[in-house]
Amino acid sequence: IEPMLADAQEEVPVGADWLYEVKWDGVRAIITVNDGDVRIKTRSQRDVTANFPELCLPEEAFYASTAVFDGEIVCLDGAGRPIFTDVMGRIHAKGERGVERARGRHPAVCYLFDCLYLDGRPIINEPLERRRAWLTDAVRSTQTEYRVSEAVDDGEALFEAAKSVGVEGIVAKERDGTYVSGRRSATWRKVKVRRTLECLV
């Protein structure tokens, strides 16, 4: 399964049809749980399971025995802000010793924001709100390295909060939207605090 992508937008969409989440600045990941085995793949389908051993404990993290989740792996600073260079250091760590050293310096957490398959059933065609409810039920509430990314109803307030704490931005998602694997869709819209442009000088 390839991750669903969001359209970029300059203004926060408003209305009762939307839910809003923090846009975590990390590594997009598809997490597959299958009878005690966890596999982690990036958006480019690279298998990075071995780079994140703290995310490979399904019995501690999930109630579901088989599932596919969409999320973002991040490394947080002391104030709870994601540091992109730290998580990239985890991705590029080599060998068992290198992975353990990188883990000791920059422990990772994974914010889950969608559930695509659960206990033998694909659910990508279900509305987002229903998928999120199943996601919440599938992830253990005790403290693990997996956390359900919180969704709120007030997007403008969340965007102002994102600006004040220095995170990348927010993502607005239609409550009844389905999951469109591997494609960009207007039912997900990212609004960045900082706008950047790549230029050749």
Image: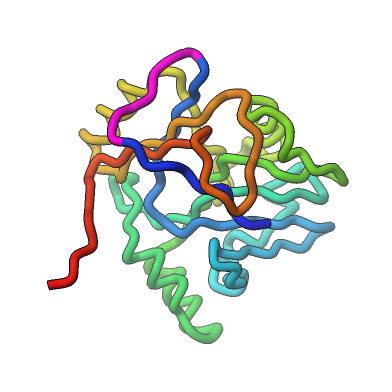
**Residue 35 vertical position relative to residue 67 in the rendered view, above or below:** below
Horizontal side, residue 24 vs residue 41: left or right: left
**Residue 116 vertical position relative to residue 93 in the rendered view, above or below:** above
User: Which image quarter: residue 162?
Assistant: top left
Indicate yes or no whether the magenta region holds residue 13: yes
Q: Nearer the viewer, residue 106 or 130?
A: 130
**Residue 172 vertical position relative to residue 43 in the rendered view, above or below:** above
Percent position (x, y) of residue 177? 61, 30
Q: What's the magenta region?
A: 10-16
Percent position (x, y) of residue 158? 34, 26
Residue appearing at x 23%, y 47% in the figure: 195
What quarter of the picture does the N terminus occupy? bottom right
Percent position (x, y) of residue 126? 73, 31
Q: Nearer the viewer, residue 185 or 30?
A: 185
Residue appearing at x 37%, y 52% in the figure: 25
Q: Nearer the viewer, residue 144 or 138?
A: 138
Horizontal side, residue 162 vs residue 28: left or right: left
What quarter of the picture does the C terminus occupy? bottom left
